Amino acid sequence: MKNKIENNGIGRWVKKALCGGAMLGLAMTMGATSAIAAEDGAARSHGFGSMTPFSRVAKVPVVRVKGEIDYKATYAKARAASLAIATYVARIKEADTLGSDVIKGIDWKLGGTSEECLTTRVCSDEEIDHNVLMIPSPDPIDPTDATYVETGVVTKSNTKKGNVVEFCNKKYASMAMGVAPIIDTRPVVNGWAHAPALPCEVSVWNDDQHIYVDMLDPSAIFTLFFSDVLFSADMQDPAFAEALYAMPPQVKAEIVAIIHAALADFDPDTKAMDQKIGPVYNSIEDIIAVVDASPLDSPFLHMVYTKQDGGVFTDAESKAVAQTIINTMSIHGNADAGTHPTVINEAGDTLDSILSPKSSWRSARTAPITIPGKNHIIEACSPKYAKMAMGTGLHHVNALPCEITVKTIDSGNKLVISYLDPAFMLGAMFADISEEDQAKFGAIPGLINDDLQAVVKTALDVNLGIALNAPVRKVINMLP
């Protein structure tokens, strides 16, 4: 496989990306250090030019019959391409096929898969398929479908969805979460607080021109969601800064290499790309501005809980909290997905009575994803709000689903539940949308935030079985 990849040009592209990544990391280091030291009020550059949250890494040809696009076959091919990538991640030890000069860390794993799949790489087709998420859009799969042409209504069977594959890597996640040091014995500050920004996401979707393979750009995501690390005292040490900034481009290069390896066998006409997609950030001032403009001055909302009896939370209880939230929210694929019958008060009101109308919240997975540091990730999805978001362009699909994490801190004395703030996500990840689309969102981020916190409150107050004190917000300063 490796020779085949090199012959079609992808191998050369990967080596170029790795070399460029090293230079990028060094440039970022110098830019970040000078940005922190600047005090004259002048515009400050992060040292690596413009960046975007999304990166297009490949295009796959659509299916054409007699020169005309076959919409349904193209949509099916997009799904098959996502499964080809997911299957490669789940079953292949990448260092063996791509070489240790490309894969520097521990092998990548497919997010959401079972312990057996993770450890043995014996993963069924059904399990792989189940763990490639599908995010609905308001668009039809086939705009020439007779029913759609006649009514203009997108039916359930004709709803186009974007495919999301989640990549997990123990080495890089451990460094990002502060479990493993960057250099010496020094980890990043506030490691656990960044958990809702993981795992790495890759999407596959189509229009009538191409099938696109996009990813969250690791350098942009690190800068947007780890700004507290960027402005920490540790970054005054050039060695620490250089080691830290070497990680995001290396992560990107490895994921891109895996994608291209998987697609080389899937469709030899796949075109390798490195295209910036989405809102553009040109300076460190842009990063500061988007964080400062968010209601919480942060991408995250952290709520801390303690037990009424003063006891500590065990690791098993922490995971049980995450599972209880999932069960309360309902689980996608189940017959009752999107309905919430839990009674919340003596009057007999149910959770659905306080959630926003037709939100139909559900968990994308049956169980949380656990990443290093025993951070348990819940992926919440509302078809209603997902379609609104995807109506602004399917290239935004990697910004979904909504992430909630559960984690014990302070030796188990506290349990923290963290949310990705919807208002920050709209401002940072969807800043390229039109003013008209921005106006449509209006109060939507607030509704999403209220809904998710209502689900969590119901899960903890009604279904958990552990008496907790009222939560207190933990504020982590993300700005200099």
Image (cartoon, rainbow, N blue to C red):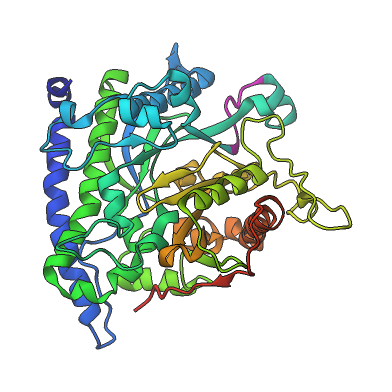
- 380 part of magenta stretch: no
Residue 59 appears in the rendering: yes
- In the rendered image of this protein, does residue 216 appear above or below residue 291? above
Query: Residue 369: which quarter of the image?
Result: top left
**Quick one: 47 or 102, which is closer to the camera?**
102
The residue lying at 68 percent from left, 26 percent from top is 149
Residue found at the far right of this picture = 347
- Quadrant housing the C terminus: bottom left
**Quick one: 246 or 152, which is closer to the camera?**
246
Start-end of magenta stretch: 137-145
- In the rendered image of this protein, does residue 238 appear above or below residue 345? below
In percent of width and height, residue 231 lies at 29, 74
Residue 60 appears in the rendering: no
For residue 54, side relative to residue 42 (left or right): right
The residue lying at 32 percent from left, 62 percent from top is 223
Residue found at the far bottom of this picture = 40
For residue 116, side relative to residue 456 (left or right): left
In percent of width and height, residue 140 lies at 60, 30
The residue lying at 35 percent from left, 56 percent from top is 221
In percent of width and height, residue 241 lies at 18, 66
- In the rendered image of this protein, does residue 134 appear above or below residue 281? above
**Quick one: 120 or 452, which is closer to the camera?**
120
